Amino acid sequence: MRGKWVLITGASSGFGAAAAVAFGAAGAAVILGARREDRLIESARAAKAAGAPDAVYRKLDVSNTGSVDEFVRWVKGVCPQLDVLVNNAGGALGLETVEQGLDEDWEGMMQVNVLGVLRMTRAALPLLKANPGSMIINLGSIAGRVAYEGGAAYCAAKAGELQITRALRLELCGTGVRVGTLDPGMAETEFSVVRFKGDETRAAKVYQGVEPLKASDVADALVWMASRPAHVNIDEMIIKCTDQAAIHKVNRRG
């Protein structure tokens, strides 16, 4: 990854912040975007401390087309080329059934997980297509492959991400741009705290008795996908902790 430039959305926490460090440790320069600019400063510092030759950041809201377009215009001025786009920004809101679901939660999940991926990819594609061997990695979820109670909107959003990835793989064949999705299972980040709107006690119960994935585990997989030779494309990767065989099959210790 030395000499490469990697753009990571949602880089203020979780997988995105860990990816900034992992790509930095691999020798890549990182471009970081997220809504929480104060947290981006921390991510950039951590990436530099890990070995990134450069780590730049700017506020980014992938749910807003103007913010995305302005961000990519800025990117054009700060890096000589774009080698990797990690569409990481996303997340779940609520665990209500469809009958009890809230419009604002549904719309928020669709805006970030689906439309955000489309907006960022559309804006960044000219830079990626000018650099054969570049790669788009979308952060999905096993929820995009298997539904569960209370997850209708989130599962639908991540299924949308999966199909966007598959469509892009077809559309970009012949351009030299590689496309893949990384779909994690249970991973302990701020994900559940955000889903349960700050209820840390409820969030902790999700991982009770389990050794879940860490953000760094997912970040390591991202680096591996991106660092394959230009003729190798990792289309789809599912990564779960050993304690989780499936969404509904989890080993919990007493």
Image (spheres, grey):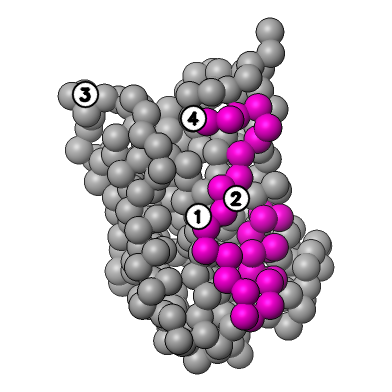
In the structure shown, which secondary structural element does the residue marked by tag 2 occupy? helix
Residue named by callout 2: 15
Drawn side of residue 124 relative to residue 214, left or right: left
> In terms of sequence position, does the residue under pointer 2 or pointer 1 come before the other?
2
Q: Is residue 127 visible?
A: no
Mark 2 and mark 1: span between their CA atoms?
9 Å
Residue named by callout 3: 100
Is disc 4 surrounded by few (<14), some (14 to 19) or many (20+) residues within 10 Å? Answer: some
- Disc 2 residue type (three-letter): Phe
> In terms of sequence position, does the residue under pointer 2 or pointer 3 come before the other?
2
Compared to 4, does 114 lie above or below? above
Mark 4 and mark 2: span between their CA atoms?
20 Å
Q: Please tell me how many numbered marks the rendered image carries.
A: 4
Q: Which residues are magenta?
A: 219-246
In the structure shown, which secondary structural element does the residue marked by tag 1 occupy? strand
Query: How far from the left and from the top, in percent, is residue 241?
Result: 65, 35
Is disc 2 surrounded by few (<14), some (14 to 19) or many (20+) residues within 10 Å? Answer: many
- Quadrant of the frame with the N terminus: bottom right
Residue named by callout 4: 247
> In terms of sequence position, does the residue under pointer 4 or pointer 1 come before the other?
1
Query: How far from the left and from the top, in percent, is residue 128?
Result: 50, 83
Compared to 211, does 175 lie above or below? below
Residue 124 counted in the magenta span: no
For the residues labelled 2 and 3, say whether their Cβ atoms are less than 8 Å apart: no
- In the picture as drawn, the residue positioned furthest to the top comes out as 254
Mark 4 and mark 1: span between their CA atoms?
17 Å
Residue named by callout 1: 139
Query: Residue sitting at 41 percent across and 43 percent down?
Result: 145
Mark 2 and mark 3: span between their CA atoms?
30 Å
